[in-house]
Image (spheres, rainbow, N blue to C red):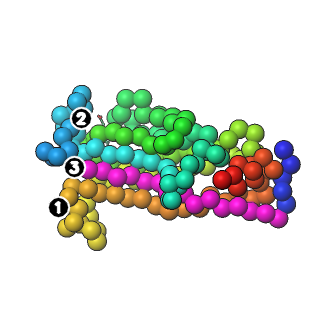
Amino acid sequence: SRRIKNISISKPIIYGNVAQKISETNPLPEGAPADHTHTWKVFVADPLGNDLSSYIRKVVFKLHDTYNNPTRSIEEPPFEVSETGWGEFEIVIKIYFNNDCGEKNITFYHHLKLHPYGPNVEESQKTGRVESILFDEIVFNEPTERMFRLLTAK
Ligand code: SLL
């Protein structure tokens, strides 16, 4: 489909992880290795909770090789992976846009955060909860007519 000149559309997006220390109130899920110390979830989402699947076809999360099937392909919302573990590592997040929209996939790198440090360290030590979430904007320059419709659909 044709491209629309002199137009760019940006879509807000958040990505990152939340983690919770294993405790009495957050027990290790059944089947998880005994040395795992945290439950965690990595995700890509709209900051206001809107549905991203109008223009995102799938999100692939590449975990550390210590995980079974480290390449996790999520083809419908919510675009997220929940896991357990003991260590921090870099997660490669690849976002694929809808077919025939003329857009290449894009890649984010996210450092999975499990351990509390920094400004909220005391609160985090109390609750066992840690999060690392980033805000970004995906800019579509001269989108195709088809992509324009997907990006502006309500
Ligand atoms: C490193 N940062 O570079 C570390 C790796 C790997 C974390 C951390 C569980 C894997 C499993 C897990 O937490 N892996 O289920 O065995 O060496």
Q: Determine whether label 3 and label 2 are within 8 Å by CB.
A: no
Label 1 CA crowd tier, 10 Å (few <14, some 14–19, many 20+):
few
Q: Earlier in the sequence, mark 3 or mark 2?
A: 3
Outermost residue, left direction? Answer: 24
**In the image, what residue type sits under mark 2?**
Pro
**In the image, what residue type sits under mark 3?**
Lys
The quarter in which the N terminus is drawn is: top right
Which residue is at 55% across, 35% downward? 75
Residue 148 in the figure: left or right of residue 117:
right
Where ligand 1 lies, by image quadrant?
Answer: top left
Element carrying mark 3: strand
Which residue is at 54% across, 62% downward? 136
Residue 87 in the figure: left or right of residue 126:
right
What is the span of residues highlighted in magenta in the rendered image?
6-21
**Alpha carbon of mark 3 to alpha carbon of mark 1: how far?**
10 Å
Q: Position of residue 130 (x, y in %)?
A: 29, 57
Label 3 CA crowd tier, 10 Å (few <14, some 14–19, many 20+):
many
Which residue is at 55% across, 44% downward? 94
Q: Earlier in the sequence, mark 3 or mark 1?
A: 3
Q: Which residue is mark 1?
A: 126
